Image: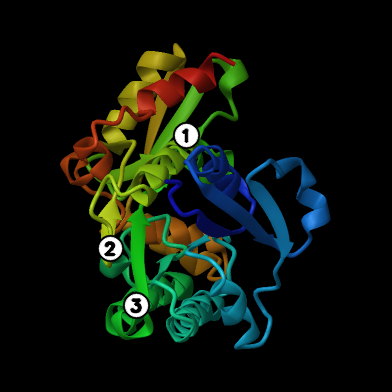
Amino acid sequence: MTSPQTTILLLGAGELGTAFLPHLSALPNTHITIGIRSPSKYTHLQSPNIFLTAIDLSSPSPSLAKTFSAYDILISATGFGADPSSVLRLAEEALLAGKIRKEQGKGKLWFFPWQWGVDYDVIGDGEGMMPLFGAQRDVRNLLRRKAVESNVKWTVVSTGIFMSFLFEQFWGIVDRSKEKDGKVMVRCLRDWNHKVTVTGVNDIGRVLARVVVGDVKAEDRVLYIAGDTISYGQLADIVKRVSGKQVEQEAWSIEHLKKELDSAPEDGIKKYRLVFARDGVWWEMDRAVNKALGMDMMDVETFTRSLFSR
């Protein structure tokens, strides 16, 4: 007897959304629809079980909820650029979609909100600096209060920051601007013992697929995954060992980061740096569900080697 088909609506086709596709599409009896504003730009993503549909997330309620209700699983990969109010509204529409499914005699809607990042329960709104982070915390609390009565189950997957982000030039932590001169600058946020959890986007997709098929208990809870959790001191040591360059180190203390932000209070990157110098941006590897699943993940040293071998 053929098992029933699972329908997934994936919102967004950016770096993370496209990283999900090969892993989700490989699952048996799975039908994936990518919801995006302009499907004509993404026809290259189509396959026998990957389809495209036009979705405007600013559509009025309840039309958005009715669209969501047609699917078994709703995964948000809409990106960091979302307006704070939009992430909360999306959760509200998901709850309404669950109620619509109940009226139609369907099972629970499984909702994965955009939480592919740090621990928003701990970090909150970053002392008022990051309204988007505060909204992410509010989404968690809303789901905790309303999901059961709304015929919705939810899973938050906390990933830390994307592995590649740690090495982005604009982030300033691993500064390769003088690499042609044989020098690399490594900076720390807070101090050299402060840690950060990072995960590669492909590995996030691998873990998500294991969650969807039920290899880990995931209903109505926060899951933690990690490709690696390292201190900034360990990061500096890795860059020294791998790059073969002269590595200089500079500490960006909380006091320094506050002064930097005071000089440009609307600078989003400076806000992020100060928030990431605080708690909630890392967890021990033994808390990661990928460890419990016995999954090999890309670590920082492996990623660093791939960068400096180019």
Name the N-terminal-most of marks 1 and 3.
Answer: 3
Q: Is residue 131 left or right of residue 300?
A: right
> What residue lies at 38% left-to-right and 28% top-to-bottom?
298
**Farthest residue, direction left:** 286
Name the N-terminal-most of marks 1 and 2.
Answer: 1
Quadrant in the picture for residue 239:
top left
For disc 2, the marked residue is: 219
Real-space Cα separation, disc 3 to disc 2, in angstroms: 11 Å
| Nearer to the camera, 254 or 141 | 141
| Nearer to the camera, 246 or 30 | 30
For disc 3, the marked residue is: 143
Q: Where is residue 102 drawn, in percent x and y?
A: 42, 82
Q: Are marks 1 and 3 in contact (CB under 8 Å)?
A: no
Q: Where is residue 177 drawn, in percent x and y?
A: 60, 30
For disc 1, the marked residue is: 174
Q: Quadrant of the C terminus?
A: top right
Foreground tag (3 vs 2): 2
Real-space Cα separation, disc 1 to disc 2, in angstroms: 37 Å
Q: Are marks 3 and 2 in contact (CB under 8 Å)?
A: no
Q: Where is residue 88 drawn, in percent x and y?
A: 48, 79
> What residue lies at 36% left-to-right and 15% top-to-bottom?
241
Q: Is residue 97 left or right of residue 150?
A: right
Assign a secondary structure to mark 1: strand
In the image, residue 89 sits, relative to residue 207, either above or below, namely below
In the image, residue 100 sits, relative to residue 266, either above or below, namely below
| Nearer to the camera, 282 or 247 | 282
Give the residue type that dot 2 points to: Glu
Q: Where is residue 263 drawn, in percent x and y?
A: 53, 66
| Nearer to the camera, 82 or 23 | 23
Give the residue type that dot 1 points to: Val
Q: Is residue 214 left or right of residue 95?
A: left
**Number of residues whose C-alpha sits closer than 10 Å to that of mark 2, classed few (under 14), some (14–19) or many (20 or more):** some
